[in-house]
Amino acid sequence: MKLLFGIATLTLGCTAALFSQNPACDGIRYKQPVFAAVKKTTLPYAPATSHLGQPITLSMDVYEPEGDTTSRRPVVVLEHGGSFVFGNKSDMAQWCELLAKRGYVAASIQYRLFPVFPLGIPDSTKIMDTAVKAVGDMKAAVRYFREDAATANLFRADPEHIYVGGYSAGAVAALHATYLDETDNLPLFMQTIIANNGGFEGNTGSASNKTFSSKIGAVINMSGGLYRRGWISDGEPPMAGIHGTADGTVPFLTGVAANIAYLEGTGVLHPYALSTGVWTYLKKVPGGGHGNIYDQPQYAVQLDNYWMRATALLEHLTCFVDTLPQIATPVVEQSAGSGIEWAIFPNPVQHDVCTVRIPTFDGDATVVFHDLNGREVLRSENIRQGVQTVSLTGLAPGAYSVGLVERGKVLGWSKLVRM
């Protein structure tokens, strides 16, 4: 059982790893723009080998809030779109600046693209090989910031809070970097591609870079997809996604992306992730296409709402816990210090009631629900020993922190996902 700031955290199904709170957390920074100007630095981050077998050095654009004096800042590593054959790191400047103005260090990285000249148009296997290379490049960039934090400390990165993301192909790479690992059931061609590219960590980066962790805290998914939804497993990082339902490049549901390779889009990944207990948010944009939801005025409200939710998630992870506890099946655990055992289920819940069970408790408690912004949105009083139902009428779909409280004292925390 993990303790968060002196309060016992009850997790159902698994226990999340503990990370410390970022020192700059004030309830506003990381969620809202607090800086007017942004500083950009371009520098190399990792050696790699090109598709043609030549040594190359990859670079990144790093965006920081101008005038920031905070000792440690969470990092978001982004990759641009372009079907893994074109595009440039400058394409993500808008989103890097958005994040930097909220207090993050945001990096848009160069990654290896398939060289149409001289290799011609790639088939599905060659494009998947390129995607795996892009995953390795992203992991090397994550490791770069951890190595920098331990050595030169150029960017004052918070090594405990590093997130990834991207748009289109960049989101595809970010999703695979987050969810593809050795526990997954992989087809033979994928096993071969991964082995040929240095394994799950990839072959990008210096010897010292490879000694650092590539652990990812969450993924920002802008119109991306994953080869197989089943690669998302209980206990893995949260995902915040936005996707147009009429996307003709990366399908909202399933299909052949960019007329090259099969992908399962955010409209499939979101409900599957919920079913496993992984926390996920989806801003579905009805009628939206692949690129127009990011630059057309009619979608501005949905896009702003997405970034409000996505940065609220990153702020929550940075300032309170490392992940939302993952819940699939109710498992009673002892709440450290209080001596109270309790469970709330089913989880996720699809109806207007859930059940609270307290096997042993001599008292009268209250169950309190908070949203991701820390606001109390629902409470149910007179919770006593035994099994009783709690009405969820009026509770919107989403993820909630649930506290068991007696006379102002929190006996334990859990999480509930309302579908």
Image (cartoon, rainbow, N blue to C red):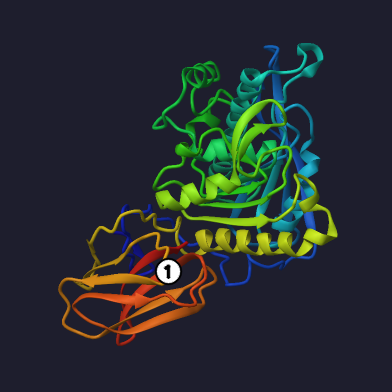
Q: Residue at x 64, y 57 (%)?
A: 283
**Please, is residue 182 above or below residue 55 in the view?**
below
Q: Position of residue 128 (x, y in %)?
A: 61, 24
Q: Residue at x 55, y 19 (%)?
A: 197
Q: Position of residue 150 (x, y in %)?
A: 53, 43
Is residue 182 toward the left or the right of residue 271 in the image? Answer: left
Closer to the camera in the image, 19 or 9: 9
Closer to the camera in the image, 249 or 127: 249
Q: Position of residue 278 (x, y in %)?
A: 45, 51
**Please, is residue 244 above or below residue 144 in the view?**
below
Closer to the camera in the image, 208 or 140: 140
- Is residue 141 among what the camera can see? no
Total tally of numbered discs in the picture: 1
Q: State the quadrant of the N terminus.
A: bottom left
Is residue 380 toward the left or the right of residue 260 in the image? Answer: left
As helix, strand or loop, the secondary structure at mark 1 comes to strand
- Classify mark 1: residues with Cα within 10 Å, few (<14), some (14-19) or many (20+): some
Q: Position of residue 130 (x, y in %)?
A: 65, 24
**Please, is residue 160 above or below residue 376 in the view?**
above
Closer to the camera in the image, 222 or 217: 222
- Is residue 326 among what the camera can see? yes
Q: In terms of image quadrants, where is residue 99?
A: bottom right
Q: Residue at x 66, y 60 (%)?
A: 306
Per the image, the residue denoted by label 1 is 401
Which amino acid type is marked by label 1? Ser
